Amino acid sequence: MTKGPDAQVKLWCGKPTPNTGCTRTHLNYIARMTKPTADTLAAAAKAASGKGPPPVHLWNPPFCGNIDMRIARDGTWYYLGTPIGRAPLVKLFSSILKREGDAYFLVTPVEKVGIKVDDAPLLANDFDVTGAGPAQVLTFTTRTEDQATLGPDHPLRVTRDAATGEPSPYILVRANLWALIDRKSFFRLVELCCHHEVDGHKWFGLWSSGQFFPIIPSSELP
């Protein structure tokens, strides 16, 4: 193996692992870890991400089990049953989120741990509007400062509670990670909605980026 600060590390818990592409400078301390914690995940994510967003799609480390971390429906992150109060730390953890099927993980170049997500992993708590009608553009911001413009690449989906019929709207933010749109934002969205025909049926919904997103059949409105 090449020596020096740029030598690639191929260790996990003192054992060989597939090449991660990360340098000894970034990861030499992680190789000595026996079990991931919030602190080691944060340190590894910060070291590996550099100046841009972490390239989570390039990382495929071994699964190291689950940790006691949970994202509540209101977007609050918990570790060991206690809310994580530091917004920069929550933002960092959010940046290394990965979804596989219906499971969620925090991923670094050398470790992958499972976490629990009560509903959606992200929460959209604000949005900006430009234009009107079919020329309207809605750009959402999440609690962890992601931004997504509602359109073909970031569609809207709406689920309805089987018992109450109450809608829950979501926007796709990145890499199969959806954000629940919070209640106050949803009430603002309703004010921007209009009726439009889709496949021969009238729907109440939203325009953004030249596309109409149906929310509820017009016939079901009072």
Image: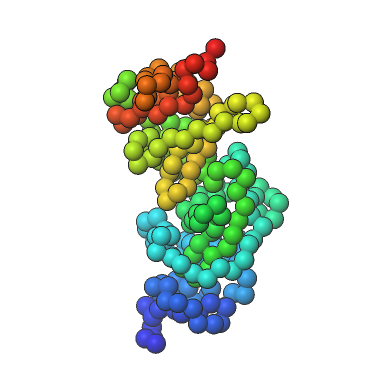
Work out whether residue 219 can be spotted: yes
Which quadrant of the structure image shows residue 137?
Answer: top left
Residue 131 screen position, x and y as percent: 30, 23
Look at the picture and state if 162 lies above or below 34: above
> The N terminus appears in which quarter of the rendering?
bottom left
> The C terminus appears in which quarter of the rendering?
top right
Work out whether residue 85 can be spotted: no
Which quadrant of the structure image shows residue 41?
Answer: bottom right
Residue 121 screen position, x and y as percent: 54, 46
Side of 123 where 57 appears, left or right: left
Which quadrant of the structure image shows residue 7?
Answer: bottom left
Residue at x 54%, y 33% (from the top left corner)? 159
Q: How is the image coloured?
A: rainbow
As rendered, which of 172 and 161 lies closer to the eye?
Answer: 161
Residue lying farthest to the front in this orientation: 200
Residue 177 screen position, x and y as percent: 47, 47
As rendered, which of 6 and 182 lies closer to the eye?
Answer: 182
Residue at x 41%, y 21% (from the top left corner)? 201
Residue at x 47%, y 61% (from the top left corner)? 46
Look at the picture and state if 67 lies above or below 83: below
Residue at x 45%, y 38% (from the top left corner)? 171
Residue lying farthest to the right in this orientation: 81
Residue 44 screen position, x and y as percent: 50, 65
As rendered, which of 46 and 140 lies closer to the eye?
Answer: 140
Count of labels in the image: 0
